[in-house]
């Protein structure tokens, strides 16, 4: 497997980490004889970095919502477990809530 680098250092175990918006915005490319328009590159980098910022924020918000829902479920399960009696105390209980 080819070695992959970021900032001149190999990635741990050959796997890249997450790109940051700052890294996208500040990435420099070597000049070539038939290069590209640097302004177009910078504009594209800015667009990619903005998109990455929005996606990172969406992931953060979804993670918070996920944590909130997990806590609510655990709380509900705790309350439900306290209120429910064992099945032998309910001879007509079919096993449903």
Image (cartoon, rainbow, N blue to C red):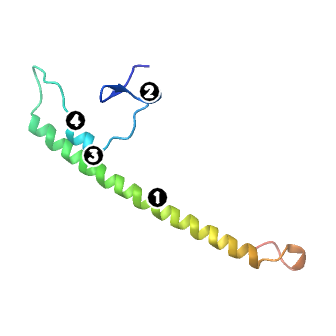
Find numbered disc 1 in the image and state the secondary structure of the residue it sits on: helix
Q: Quadrant of the C terminus?
A: bottom right
Circle 2: is it few (<14), some (14-19), or many (20+) Cα within 10 Å? few
Q: Nearer the viewer, residue 20 or 59?
A: 20
Question: Could you tell me which residue is drawn at 90 percent across and 75 percent down?
Answer: 88
Circle 4: is it few (<14), some (14-19), or many (20+) Cα within 10 Å? few
Find numbered disc 4 in the image and state the secondary structure of the residue it sits on: loop
**Disc number for residue 14:** 2
The residue carrying mark 1 is: 63
Q: Quadrant of residue 43?
A: top left
The residue carrying mark 3 is: 21
Question: Could you tell me which residue is drawn at 63 percent across and 71 percent down?
Answer: 75
Q: Nearer the viewer, residue 8 or 79?
A: 8
Cα distance in 3D space between marks 4 and 3: 10 Å
Q: Quadrant of residue 17?
A: top left
Find numbered disc 2 in the image and state the secondary structure of the residue it sits on: helix
Cα distance in 3D space between marks 1 and 2: 27 Å
Circle 3: is it few (<14), some (14-19), or many (20+) Cα within 10 Å? some
**Disc number for residue 27:** 4
Q: Is residue 51 above or below residue 24?
A: below
Question: Could you tell me which residue is drawn at 13 percent across and 21 percent down?
Answer: 32
């Amino acid at each position: 497997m080819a070695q992959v680098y970021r900032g001149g250092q190999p990635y741990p175990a050959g796997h890249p980490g997450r790109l940051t918006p700052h890294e996208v915005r500040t990435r420099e490319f070597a000049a070539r004889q038939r290069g590209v328009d640097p302004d177009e590159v910078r504009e594209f980098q800015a667009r990619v970095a903005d998109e990455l910022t929005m996606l990172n924020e969406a992931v953060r918000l979804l993670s918070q919502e996920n944590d909130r829902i997990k806590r609510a479920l655990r709380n509900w399960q705790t309350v439900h477990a306290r209120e429910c009696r064992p099945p032998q105390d309910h001879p007509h209980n079919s096993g449903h809530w």
